[in-house]
Image (spheres, rainbow, N blue to C red):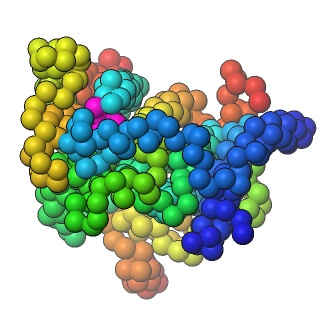
Amino acid sequence: MIAIVLFVSVLLIGLAAGAIFVRSLGSAVILLGAVSLLVALAFLLLAAPDVAITEAAIGSALTTLVYVLALRRTDSVHRADTDGELGMERAGGTAKGAFKGAPRIDGVARAADGSVLQSGVSSAGASRASEAKGDSRA
Amino acid sequence: MISVSAVLYTTSIILVLLGLYGALTRKNLIRTVISLDVIDLGVNIFLITIGYIKDGRAPIYVIGSGSLSVQAARMADPLPQALVLTAIVIGFGVTAVALTLIMRLYEKRKTVEVSETRGLKW
Amino acid sequence: MRKVIGFLLIASFAFFIVSLVARDLWIDDPAQVRTIGQAAIGQTIPQSGAANTVTAIVVQFRGLDTLGEVTVLFLSAIGVALLSGEFAGRGLNELFADDGGFILHYGTRLVLPLIALVGAYIVAHGHLSPGGGFPGGVLIATAVFAVLMTNVQQRLSTRLMAVIEGLAGLAFVGLGTLGLLGDKFSFLANVLPKGELGFLFSAGIIPLIYAAVGTKVAAELSTLVTSLTGSDKDAGPASVSAGGKGGAR
């Protein structure tokens, strides 16, 4: 019992420090959801199932959803915090560079440097389509 | 051996201090709201740890398993749990209103960094 | 410089807290702080007939605090709806370029009644097993939130939510007023028959109050998430602000 409680406590402090100090805001919000779930587990270990159900429903479901909406509306999902210390260390302060190779999941086809090719096509299909367009032009 | 209460009291106090440090020194407003949330979680753990007894059971009577007075002797304290139930719901309300304020600030000033808005100097 | 001041403040605060708490840190069985809890555990079955002591405390022994909590949630839902007035009617189309696809679109609609059923179960059995009105209401609102986030064209009428919320609040206060008409003459007294321990229809007015609370919380949080995702069907003149500005110019 004491071993589980020690493990959960150490994980709790580590993830909460991560949520406050990590550079990317999206990661911080996900870490906060994980901390809420761990706190619900701690409530269960403390013989409080009522509170555990309430904390799991509110803290990890609703709060994370509202944070994600707030991040989306303030355009901060891929933005790097100027005074975060952990995580990605790109010069220039924006984390967009880290995702240069990965496709963005918003249904808009993008070339490798982020410029838009055509809408409604996935990026794997877009690269093939752009190659075909390049071939037909050449 | 170290008791469960000691570990959890220490953890909750460290969480409150971490959240307080984050709320004082972070420039990004969303990071400030995250720190306030961490303070909320620390305080809730602290409150429930007050009511914990060694090898306590949940404060719910179960019909089939033994006499009611035997069950009552090992129950954890239900009063802090009732208070924390309220506190969790109200903490969510505070977070939702704070984030809506930040969304409006972004629409007006196009920034969520405190150092770039004129009224808040920190 | 700011970080140094932050460190000093945190250190002094830590010293203050530890000096207050340190003498209790090693006790796992604090008999002297349990007096009210002990009384609550002892008086639950005689006075309320519920098997869940936390429910008995929240609804009966401290029922007025629950009324206050529901009011605070109501205020926060109003606050969010007021502050997000300009984008309460503009849908998610501008935020998410992708609608979510076929699976999310129909999957969330399929799962919504199941989640609502689990939420209603948790609300109805609040006096017998852990849960109650608050987590049940939150669960129903989460299901509504899931549908609203994946179907960007979906609109929810906040006027209907306001009517449901008002009726549920009226039910709460009405049940409390029943206590004034009984022989105990106190607001929120438990005047209905207590029944047998462990049955669904027992514990007087506690399941009824929790049903009212669950409905009110679900309606309030649905209003909150509707304003935030911009899926309000009854948004005021702000929803035509884009057209209005273009027309004025």
At 75% from the left and 49% from the top, the residue drawn is A83
- Residue C2 in the image: x percent, y percent? 85, 37
Question: Which of the pair C150/C197 is nearer the observer?
Answer: C197
At 10% from the left and 31% from the top, the residue drawn is C192
At 53% from the left and 53% from the top, the residue drawn is B52
Q: Quadrant of the C terminus of chain C?
A: top left
- Residue B51 in the image: x percent, y percent? 53, 47
Is residue C207 in the magenta section? no
User: Is C248 situated above or below A31?
Assistant: above
At 48% from the left and 72% from the top, the residue drawn is A103
Question: Which of the pair C224/B9 is nearer the observer?
Answer: B9
Question: Which of the pair B47/C10 is nearer the observer?
Answer: B47
User: Is B107 situated above or below B76?
Assistant: above
State whether residue C233 appears in this view.
no
Numbered range of the magenta stretch: C56-60
Chief SS of the magenta region: helix
Q: Quadrant of the N terminus of chain C?
A: top right
- When asked about the image quadrant of residue A120, the answer is bottom left
User: Is C188 situated above or below A61?
Assistant: above
Q: Is residue C18 left or right of residue C54?
A: right
- Residue C99 in the image: x percent, y percent? 27, 59
State whether residue C183 appears in this view.
yes
Question: Which of the pair B17/A50 is nearer the observer?
Answer: A50
Q: Is residue C212 left or right of residue B33?
A: left
- When asked about the image quadrant of residue C151, the answer is bottom left
